[in-house]
Image (cartoon, rainbow, N blue to C red):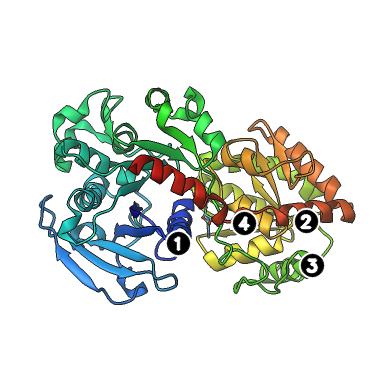
Amino acid sequence: MKILFASSEIHPLIKTGGLADVAGALPVALRSKEIDVKLIMPAYQGILEKLPPVKNSTNLGNPFGCGDLILLETQLADSNTPIYLVQCQNLFERDAGPYLDIYGQDFGDNDIRFAAFSWVCALITQHGTLIGWQPDLLHLNDWQTGYAAAYLAAWRLNHPPIVTTVHNLRYNGSFPIERFDEVRLPHDLLSIHGMEFYGRYSSLKAGLVFADAITTVSPTYAHEILTPTYGDGLDGTLRAQSNKLSGILNGVDYNEWSPSIDPFIHTHYDLHSLDNKQQNKLALQRENGLPESPNIPVFGVVSRLTEQKGLDLIPAAIEPALKQGAMFILLGSGDKGLEQQYLDLQARYPDQVSIRIGYDEAYSHRLQAGIDMLLIPSRFEPCGLTQLYALKYGTLPIVRRTGGLADTVFEEGHHANGFVFNHATAEDLRSAIDRSLVAFSDLSTWRTLQIQAMTQDHSWERVTEQWINLYESLIN
Ligand code: ADP
């Protein structure tokens, strides 16, 4: 079975969020089951230096008038997973991130950039003989690849089946209709049953309506997005397509996220040496200039700072705990107003609060290992990976009951592994924080919860079977 897996970010090459983690791990897990998966991603600036030398290079012409699109082939160094890179200097070789310029604004031509990338994905899917490898199925991820489904629809030829995975419906790739001609698609795709989206057009919608199957990254999110509250304007489209929608929970790459082997953390530990976790807490406090206090509860956050994540609720909700002496350590970046709120909190509690604004992969591991509770008060959460990492590190998540958080964190029963609240309010969050403090004050209760958290298996191997079944059902 040959699968072309298209993603705009892949860890460890480039990452802004969970999509990169998934694209870096699921294909590798599938290849271990003898599935011939190849990745495809844009050749952003600096990417080629992170990869072994290119083996093949094919010029695919200049269909968008932005310069030649060149398809390069190499493989990921660690896993030998084959990867195609779409090279085009004008479109992809830029300073700053994959989507935003150095001022944090969307690049003005993101429609053309990802249309061009998607066009190559569609071309390989339709005419794989060009490069000697034709996939049996095209797996698209999020709006950046949705255009590929539109090109395949526009070409009106029989083509291999398409799966579109929605990692976050909020980012719907919507652009002004006036720019539609730039992406070289026929206007008949602009109907309400096609890409039209409230007077604009949406590339994600193309990925939904022209796919043979739609998946989301957790079962609960797959239900939630059929409602106006979580559907972000696409719930009607999704309800019409609900017979092809399913939720498959994301997994964790335990080669990257295991406290027994994590190269980034101070002291290794596992289920049988949980006392060693404390060394990581002391090291984290030291690193942040906080008093080394092994018995004080330490709360933490690793997150993009956006409205989605509900992080505006934390300052008010955590303050009573801070007044009782707890600590709070945050790593994140994004919304400037939120950044400032947290810096203000740090200024008021300099010996208890440490805020690091930025993106730091190694520190995110040290933080997960060093804190006691991870706060994730998301308003919506398609899957969420940080709670899964926390569980493995014996760090108990405090989450809002939504999306993948609802599917993986439980406060009741013999699977209890964290704390769960219902409403996106500071009061509800505060009461979950209070419950966590009560549990933390009793070592044997806490240890039981930690052990239940650490023994939960969220490896990718657990879900590869579901993916293979889905692929097979579409290909046959
Ligand atoms: P989302 O994809 O919505 O951002 P996820 O929980 O699915 O949320 O995935 C977030 C990923 O990004 C995790 O791997 C997390 O550790 C990482 N991450 C988020 N913010 C930062 C940061 N500031 N520094 C380092 N890693 C971060």
- How far apart in space, not on screen, are marks 4 and 3 (Cα)? 18 Å
Residue located at (43% from left, 42% from top)? 470
Answer yes or no: disc 4 within 8 Å of ligand 1.
yes
Residue located at (69% from left, 52% from top)? 456
Say which element carries label 1: helix
Which mark is drawn over residue 272?
3
In front: label 2 or label 4 = 2
Q: Which residue is mark 2?
A: 451
Q: Are marks 2 and 1 in contact (CB under 8 Å)?
A: no
- How far apart in space, not on screen, are marks 2 and 4 (Cα)? 14 Å
In front: label 2 or label 1 = 1
Q: Nearer the viewer, residue 150 or 329?
A: 150
Q: Residues within 10 Å of mark 4 (few under 14, many from 20)?
A: many
Instruction: Give residue 328's position: percent from left, percent from top.
Output: 70, 55
Question: Which amino acid lies under the numbered mark 3 shown in the image of this protein?
Answer: His
Question: Which amino acid lies under the numbered mark 2 shown in the image of this protein?
Answer: Ile
Q: Which residue is mark 1?
A: 28
Q: Are marks 1 and 4 in contact (CB under 8 Å)?
A: no
Q: Residues within 10 Å of mark 2 (few under 14, many from 20)?
A: many
Q: Nearer the viewer, residue 287 or 456?
A: 456
Q: Is residue 204 left or right of residue 380?
A: left
- How far apart in space, not on screen, are marks 3 and 2 (Cα)? 9 Å
The mark nearer the N terminus, 2 or 4, is: 4
